[in-house]
Structure formats: C-alpha cells, structure tokens
Image: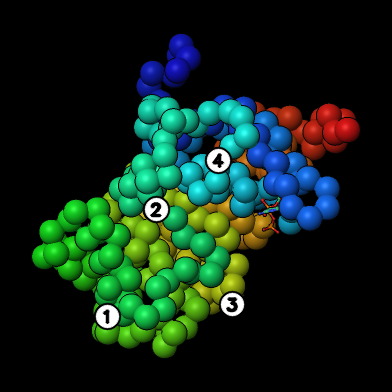
Amino acid sequence: MSAGTSDRPAPVLRAEGLVKTHYGEGAPAHAVRGVDLCVRQGEFVAITGPSGAGKSTLLHLLGGLQRPDSGSLHLDGECTDAYTESRWAVERRKRIGIVFQFFNLVSNLSVADNVELPALLAGVPPKRARAEREELLAELGLAGKERSMPGELSGGEQQRVALARALVNHPPLLLADEPAGSLDSKGTREVMRLLSRFHQRGQTILLVTHDARLASAADRVISFFDGRIADDAELDGTPSHRTGISGVLELRD
Ligand SMILES: Nc1ncnc2c1ncn2[C@@H]1O[C@H](COP(=O)(O)OP(=O)(O)OP(=O)(O)O)[C@@H](O)[C@H]1O
C-alpha cells in the first residue's frame, strides 16, 4: 500500500474509516466510530477493551456479519464493499473462519457433521472433507468424539469443535470473538494453547477479548475504547500506532 513496506507480509485484511451505529430502543449506540486497521498475513492480533467498547461490532463488520454505515474493507487486497449477503456467506466458508463465545454448533448434527458441513458447502469432495475432519479432530484431541452430539460435550470440547469447523477450509483469516468467554480456566488455557499453535503454523488470527491473559498470547494488542483504536502495539514493545486513551477521551462529544 505505502512505500517501504514491500518486505512485510501482505495485508489479509484492511479496513478504512469503518463506522457503525446501532439503532435500537433508546439512544443510538455509536459502536464503531472510525476504524483504520491493517492485519498482515501470519499476525496474531488481539483486540481488547471494556464491555461495550464496540469490539464485537468491529469483528462482525470485519467478517461481513454486519455492514458498516461508512468506510471500506479489503480482504486479500479485494474490496468487499459491493459484496452481497450470499457473497459474504461464500467468503466466510472459504476465506474467513469464525469462532464465537457460545460455539454456535448445530445442535442436532454430530461433531463430525458439524465440522464437515462447511467443507461440503464449499464444494470439497466428501472423502476429502472427511479426511480434513479426522485430521483436525485428532489434532484438537477429539478423536473418538465424532459421533457425539454437541450437547454431550463439555464447553471446552464444544469450543474445540467450533475451532475445527472454523479451520476445516484452511481460511487465511480466523476471527475469534471471546472464544474462551464461557469457559473455565482449564478451557481457557486449552483455547489459548490451540490458537498459539495454529498461529505458529502461520494462521492469521484476529481475537476479540476482554481477557488480558488471552490477549497476551497475541503478538499485537489493540486497545479498543469507545468505538476507536486507542492503542496499537506489538508485544515486543514497539508501538505501531498510538493514540492514547486521553486523546480519545478528548475527541468525544
Ligand atoms: N444489535 C444491536 N442493537 C443495538 N445496540 C447494539 C447492538 N449490538 C451492540 N449494540 C451496542 O453497541 C455498543 C457496542 O457493543 P459491542 O457488543 O460491540 O461491544 P463489546 O466491546 O463487544 O462489548 P462486550 O465486551 O460486552 O461484548 C454497546 O453499547 C451495545 O449495547
């Protein structure tokens, strides 16, 4: 994009001027108030901040689950602004894996079917979908659970199934929204370990969390406050962009 960055990995995701206001009961909620963000291949980025800061809304915009009021979003260099709902659904099958706090597994499908479904929907031949599923479930410590229904698994196990489902099509980008939010500390450690392992293998990850322990697994932490990026720092201590919370506070009203 700009000069002097040619030796850096390519951006997987680039957002410019994203704005989103929710209109519900009561006053409008200015959830995202102008976000510029570039996530490069292989990065593990955590977005952290207080409840209500707008983190989930931002992640929903980045995954095409909600549309911005203004601003634009590029995936792998391609502008998504004209994408239809069905195009976004295809992108989420192929290029973006998403895990949520409450797993969102299909309760009346077996573990195996939950994981294979996105592959089959993406046109992967059944034999290959099965092989991918077997490999992922083994890797995630879930071999032997294929025939179980989601409701028969612990929270940690269900989140691992959700992770397998999100990764079955080898998406260049994994979005995770409070993936350990409903888990106990053992489940949280498990999820952290798995995210780190996939990251070490080159998986690009964008994680939304208010849990500082989870955020510390990332190599770049973005502090989100009142709909804006307040701080953006590599965890080796190098600030890549720093606005400062006080600066954001001054910009309010
Ligand atoms: N669908 C919606 N309709 C109306 N208001 C919404 C909607 N979704 C979010 N909001 C509001 O937008 C603001 C940002 O919410 P969001 O869920 O993005 O924050 P968050 O940082 O993810 O919070 P948490 O950490 O509690 O999940 C809040 O004031 C919230 O009440």
Mark 3 neighbour density, 10 Å: few (under 14) some (14–19) many (20 or more): few
Residue 144, quarter of the rendered image: bottom left
The residue depicted at 70 percent of the width and 46 percent of the height is: 22
Residue that badge 4 annotates: 67
> Could you tell me which residue is drawn at 30 percent across and 60 percent down?
118
Q: Distance between the residues labelled 1 and 3?
A: 23 Å
Foreground: disc 1 or disc 3: 1
Residue 60 location, x and y as percent? Answer: 55, 48
Camera-side mark, 2 or 4: 4
- For image coordinates 27% across by 80% down, the residue present is 146
* Cβ at disc 3 under 8 Å from ligand 1: no
N-terminal of the pair, mark 2 or mark 3, is: 2
Judged by depth in the image, the label closer to the viewer, 2 or 3, is 2
Could you tell which of marks 2 and 1 lies nearer the N-terminus? Answer: 2
- Nearest the viewer among 18 and 242 is 18
Callout 1 secondary element: loop
Q: In this view, does 125 lie to the left or right of 66?
A: left
Amino acid, disc 4: Arg
Q: Is mark 4 on a helix, strand or loop?
A: loop
SS state under label 2: strand
| Lower sequence index among marks 1 and 4 | 4
Given residues 241 and 67, the one toward you in this image is: 67
**Considering only order in the chain, which callout, 4 or 2, is on the residue closer to the N terminus?**
4
Q: Is mark 3 on a helix, strand or loop?
A: loop
Residue 66 versus residue 253 in the image, above or below: below
- Image location (x, y in percent) of residue 147: 27, 84
Quarter assignment of residue 137: bottom left
Residue at the disc numbered 1: 146
Q: Distance between the residues labelled 2 and 4?
A: 18 Å
